[in-house]
Image (cartoon, rainbow, N blue to C red):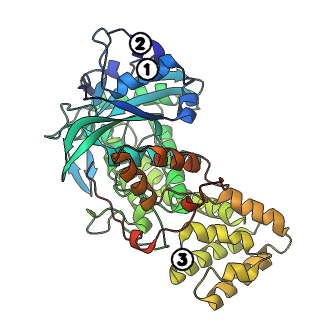
Amino acid sequence: MSSLITSSLRFTHRYASLGNAYSAPVRPQAVERSELVDMNHNELNTIALTDDTQVRTAIAKILACEWPESERPPVAMNYSGHQFGHYNPQLGDGRGLLLGEIETAQGLIDVHLKGAGTTPFSRGGDGRAVIRSTIREYLASIAMRGLGIPTTGALAMAVNQTPVYRETQERGATLLRTATTHIRFGHFEGLYYRQQHEDLRRLADYCIAQRYNHTDIAAGDYSHWFEVIVSQTASMVAKWQSVGFCHGVMNTDNFSIAGETLDYGPFAFLDNFDPQFVCNHSDHTGRYAFDQQPQIARWNLAALAQALSGLIDHQKLIATVQRFDGLFEHAYQNEMSIKLGLELVEPTLARSLIEGWLALLAQCNVDYSLAHRALADALDAEQQFLNFFSHHQLARAWLHEYQWSLSHTNPAKHRGTINGRNPLYILRNYLAQGAITAAESGDFSRLKALKACLAKPYQPIDGFEAFAGPSPGWAKSICISCSS
């Protein structure tokens, strides 16, 4: 086989060159009759590629799990982590491979293949992915990118005829994704608990040199580096909370050191506003409920801090983790002020309005995303706004305070502001399921239509009105498992 893949995508292998303490070389295991389903041109642009015949052919070969014998093999990354609060000493890439990095104007970008077969870290699994989980991650990455939330990127996906056995037999699929880095909190935890302290230091040095060389983090300044990780994580989770995103499995092995949303398993966007909503039916205790996500992010950072305790003074680590709460609250208020058009309102009043708004949404059990869109009518179409709520008196009391705070705001300008900051299209579970059901029958048109809306979620697109409404009643109780 020619080296079309590597000549088209220009991989470097800096992470792989770190050695066996961090990864294991693995060649993808070919699948049967792979079909390239879709490519994400926005993501192609981030790695300075165009959708030409050569690139498309190379990506199709990667998704078919073909790899040139003459080229350096990809690697499965080695990490551990805390799962539902309990330490698991051996996790790692059980069905994914880091193909390499690509140099871009924004720095290095990882390219990673999921569903490529078994690795030394598969733990008895088959290393494959199925259509439903692949479509969910593909669309979720596009949706989060459209919402301006840091995330791994969806580059392309394919389906194949290799049978995959979960609860039943399903068809296989593969996903090509990008990221600033695929290094997780769990990478450092594994090295720490295996007492590979010099290997841990080397990985930290690699992260600072390769991932933060455009910042003011000096080589060896591990304390500043950890401060950046805490700040980026607080910002990411604040954005999650503001759009109503539930991750579902906030284990430390699913947390990126770059503050990017990583590993879309049983995720969900809120339908009706329920702060205690749990989207993962395996989460029996509600550990990862929507309103617990900030607390869990802090818990994860504390676990990372423990792993870094050989590099950073203990008191500095404690103080940095403790700053998370303030960083999160500041970022969350900023995000919510933007959503409600309150940036110019005095902060104490804005905070009161935000708290009152969330209480109103919970009391009235209304659709979270559409309620924010309804704010567009709050200044000049009061009755239309009130009709959105079952308890008009509660809504009216809050609305009058909101109107007073924005009394000098032009209603038409306000409408444009609100609609430009609150998505019309979100990846509701029933929409994802509709795309999955069609794809399992060989129809990918719904997937592509939904992708187009999610990439530009704020303004209406003719012909896609059905994607903009609330979930039907039967769909609001959908709960997703970790099965993939």
Q: Amino acid at mark 1?
A: Thr
Q: Amino acid at mark 3?
A: Val
Q: Amino acid at mark 2?
A: Leu
Q: Nearer the viewer, mark 1 or mark 3?
A: 1
- Lower position in the chain sequence, tag 1 or tag 3: 1
Q: Quadrant of the N terminus?
A: top left
Q: Nearer the viewer, mark 3 or mark 2?
A: 2
Return the mark for residue 142.
none
Residue under label 1: 57
User: Viewer-proximal residue, 221 or 153?
Assistant: 153
Do the residues bearing badges 2 and 1 touch, measured as CB atoms within 8 Å? Answer: yes
Image location of residue 346, percent across then percent down? 75, 69
In this orientation, does residue 322 appear?
yes
- The secondary structure type at the circle numbered 1 is helix
Gap between marks 2 and 1 measured at Cα: 8 Å
Image location of residue 90, percent across then percent down? 19, 40
Residue at 46%, 38% (x, y): give it: 154
Crowding at label 3, few (<14), some or many (≥20) Cα neighbours within 10 Å?
Answer: some
Image location of residue 104, percent across then percent down? 56, 23
Residue under label 2: 4
| Residue closest to the far bottom | 393
Crowding at label 1, few (<14), some or many (≥20) Cα neighbours within 10 Å?
Answer: some
Residue under label 3: 366
- The secondary structure type at the circle numbered 3 is loop
